[in-house]
Structures are given as structure tokens and as C-alpha cells.
Image: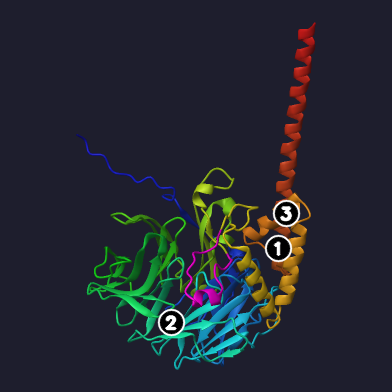
Amino acid sequence: MTWRPQYRSSKFRHVFGKAATKESCYDGVPITCSVQDNNFCAVNPRFLAVITECAGGGAFLVLSVHHTGKVDPHHPRVSGHRGNVLDIKWNPFNDCCIASCSEDATVKVWEIPPHGVLKNLTVPWKELQGHSRRVSLIEWHPTANNILFSTAYDYQIMIWNLDCSEQVIKNPLRTISHHTDVVLSMSFNTDGSLLATTCKDRKVRLMEPRSGNLLQEANSKTHRATKVMVLGNLKMLLTSGTSRWNDRQIALWDQDDLSVPLLEENLDGSSGVLFPFYDPDTYMLYLAGKGDGNIRYYEISSEKPYLHYLTEYRSLLPQKGMGVMPKRGLDVSSCEVFRFYRLVTIKSLIEPLSMIVPRRSESYQEDIYPMTAGNMPALTAEEWLIGINKGPVLMSLKPGSQVADSYSEMNKALANSLDTRRSQSRPGMLQLAYIQDQLGTKEDGGHAGDDRSRMLVSNGEDLALCSPPRTENELRLKFHKQQEEIRRLRELLNQRDVRIKQLELEIKNIKNSQSQSSL
């Protein structure tokens, strides 16, 4: 009997990385020189935020994702911290809300105007004071609205509720004190009912975030974990770190039993920290090393051998950090399944990198875009605090579709009332609410306008809220995009004209055949 190789059938075997052109990058960005092992970059479908160098304090830039090209060196910054900014994260349910933490031992939450930052922003919406040493990491709860987690060099994890009237919050909801050293990473499962952490004491901990109870603790002698990622839909944990021989290594763990890892995979002997990124919709894992120019990607399954290597993207430019675009901001027309924003310090450049599934058809590919987490909270902060757990509110990425109706009318009304109440104390929110109301009234006007406006919002290009071009380069890009759209419309009209002529000829032939048969 002849031997035959075993091939896995996979829709993502030929995924490839496509770097943006020079015109579509962000050039001249003074990226921070901090040695903290964080991403230094945060992205959503409207804004790109990156931590920068700033004399006399900490600051970060907020740019519109559409305003590519050369960045003005005097671009206004968000600069309210007295120490270097160490981490930034966008609110997953509000594209105009971002949190930052700093060496000044505070966490600040900012409201970004819908049209962008036009002058230096120094007054935050909320300031969180509770840590005694510099704050290194922050994470938003994945399903509950306005719940924020922070951890610092005082070895504490603090939980904050932003749904309150105070501008300065000094008392967190809860303080988790299980760690004996600095917390290196935090990760939630899909509904936010479990929190996994890695610590400098080489232990992986799994805990219940609401109560702070420690559920499991792992301490492997063969694997020193630095970053952790909960693979919620597989009930597994993935950690990246080093082996006992200082090789870079990843390990998979059973969520219900952290005594021994399911799998340990050595990668190489480099020294840069490995950042794992996981896409639960495609079961793909991306590994990007700090200081590397390559990104490896794998498929993960729930059965042995668990990890299936696909290929890697290679570049000559090393990355210092990475930002990741949420799924609702991807370009589904080009079969894009993931998008990185690579921070290239040697060129002061932010380079978008799209991971694309090669398909011949330009139509929407439903098999690679399942229902995904949207930008609607499943819970209010009060509901989460009383013990309710809910999975994310799902949405379809198909152009013209709406968020799935799994969010009850009562919760919608409550969320709307909370947003209205907060808008009275947030600068710029009244204008945003007015624009959204105007968009809603336009959607009711007709089916064509409805499909067009919803398509723009669902694909992350909210053109009604884009600010006008401020530089010649931006104006040129807008002009080229407009010309491309006009060209596509002309081609569509030509195709329709050809089709009309074909139908006219068919009708004429049918009439002639009928007249001849009657004779």
C-alpha cells in the first residue's frame, strides 16, 4: 500500500499579507521609545491612536483612519498625563471614547470629538486614582458597558465603573490582590466571565473577575509565560513566552485543567516578546514578535494536534508594536479577514497590513464572515455587577445588514437613556447624537438610502462624520477615490446598457419568430 500525505482542507491555507502602499501609510509619526512590552497603538473603524514622545509628560496622537500620508509634526495631541503613557485602549462600544494609563499612577478616560482632535486635549472625561505606582495595562470588559480593568506595578488589578457622576473616581469597585509581582497581560473569555493573567512570577492565573476569586493557577517549569490569550470558543488558553533554554515558545492549555499544557511549540531563539492575536471567527492565530519583521499565522482546532501552521508574512522593517482593527472595520469586498497596524520606529511609520483570503469572486463571502461581535453592549454596568453574564451582541458584516436582534428593547431603552445622560457631561456627544438621529431619519426615507447608509456604517466608513481634507495630500486622495467611484458607476451603467440592448434583441427575435409561425 503506497503512502499518501495527509492534507487538511482549509479555507485559510492561502491567506496572504498585503502591506499598504506608501500613500496609505501614516508617515512622520514620533512613536514612543518606551521599553514597555505593550502594543502602543489602538484602532477602531473611525480613529487610530498611537503613543508618542512628548517632553514634560505623556501624550498620544489620535488620527482619522482615512487621513493617511504625512502627519503634521504639530498635530494636536491628547496630553493630560504627567508621566509617560504606557497603554491605550478604545472603548469597544463607543468609537469616540479611549482610556489611557501612565507612569503618573492614574488612568484617564477621554472623549474624542467626532470630527477628531483639532486642539490639544488636556481635560479627561474621567480620571481614575487608586494605584500607588505606575499603571502598565488597561482592558475594557468585552460585553458590559463602561467597565474598565487596570493593573499597575503595585501588583493590583482594579475594576472601575465609569457609570457615575464623579469626574475623579478614587474608589474602584474591587481590587484583586492574588499576584506577587507585576502583571504582564490580561485576557477575557467571550462573555467576560473569566479573566486570565500572566505575571512576572511565571504563573498563569484564571479568575472570576467580578468577585476576584482565583479559580486555577499554572506554574510550568518548562514554559515561562509572558502573554496570555483566552480562546473563548475553544475553551483553551494560549500563552507565549520562553522555554527553559530561552527559546521563544507558545503553549496551549485546557481551560478546565491548567496543571500541564496540552501543547508546547518552540519557534526560534530570538529575544523579542511574542504578541499573540486570535480571531475567533476564523480560528486563526497570529504571532508577531517585538523587533521582528515577520508575522506567523496558524489555525487552531479543538482536537490534536491543535495547532496547524499556515505560513508567515515577512518584511524587512521591524515592528515595535501592533494595532488591530475590529472586524466591523474590515474591507469585506477584498476578502480581508484581519488587519494590523505595524509601528515601524526606524522610519516613523505606521503601516497597515491586511490579511486576505484569495477569492476570484468580488461578491460577499459568507463562509469566511460569520456573525461577529458588534459595537453594542450586551449588559449595562449595573447588570454585570449584580451577577449577569451575557455573550456579545452579534452583527453581520454583509453590506446593508443590521445588528442581530438579540439585544432586547428594554436594554436598548436603558442604554439610550444612559447615553443621553452621559452626553450632557461629555463634550461633543450632543453633536454626535444629533448626527446619528439625522442618519436615522434618512434611513427611514427610502430603501436605496437605507441600504447605502447602513452599508457605510457596517463597513466602518462613516462618511457623514468624516472631517474635510486639511492637506493637499488628503484632498488628492479624496479626489482619486471619487474618480474611482465615478469610474465604477460608469462601468455599471455600460453593463446595464449592454444588457438592455441584449434584451431588446431577444424581444425582437421572439416577435419575428412568432410572426413567421403565424404565416
The C terminus, quarter of image: top right
Residue under label 2, please give it.
36
Q: Are marks 3 and 1 in contact (CB under 8 Å)?
A: no
Q: From the viewer's perspective, is the residue at label 3 or at label 1 nearer?
A: 3
Mark 3 vs mark 2: which is more N-terminal?
A: 2
Magenta stretch, main secondary structure, is: loop
Label 3: few (<14), some or many (≥20) within 10 Å? some
Mark 3 vs mark 1: which is more N-terminal?
A: 3
Nearer to me, 183 or 443? 443
Q: Amino acid at mark 3?
A: Asp
Q: Residue at x 43, y 51 (%)?
A: 12
- Does residue 376 show up magenta in the picture? yes
Q: From the viewer's perspective, is the residue at label 3 or at label 2 nearer?
A: 3
Task: Check residue 263 in the rendering and tell me which mark sits there, or answer none.
Answer: none
Q: Residue at x 34, y 78 (%)?
A: 214
Label 1: few (<14), some or many (≥20) within 10 Å? few
Task: Check residue 450 in the rendering and tell me which mark sits there, or answer none.
Answer: 3
| Residue 7, quarter of the rendered image | top left
| Residue 232, quarter of the rendered image | bottom left
| Residue span colored magenta | 375-394
Pick out the residue farthest to the top. 519
Label 3 to label 2: alpha-carbon separation: 46 Å
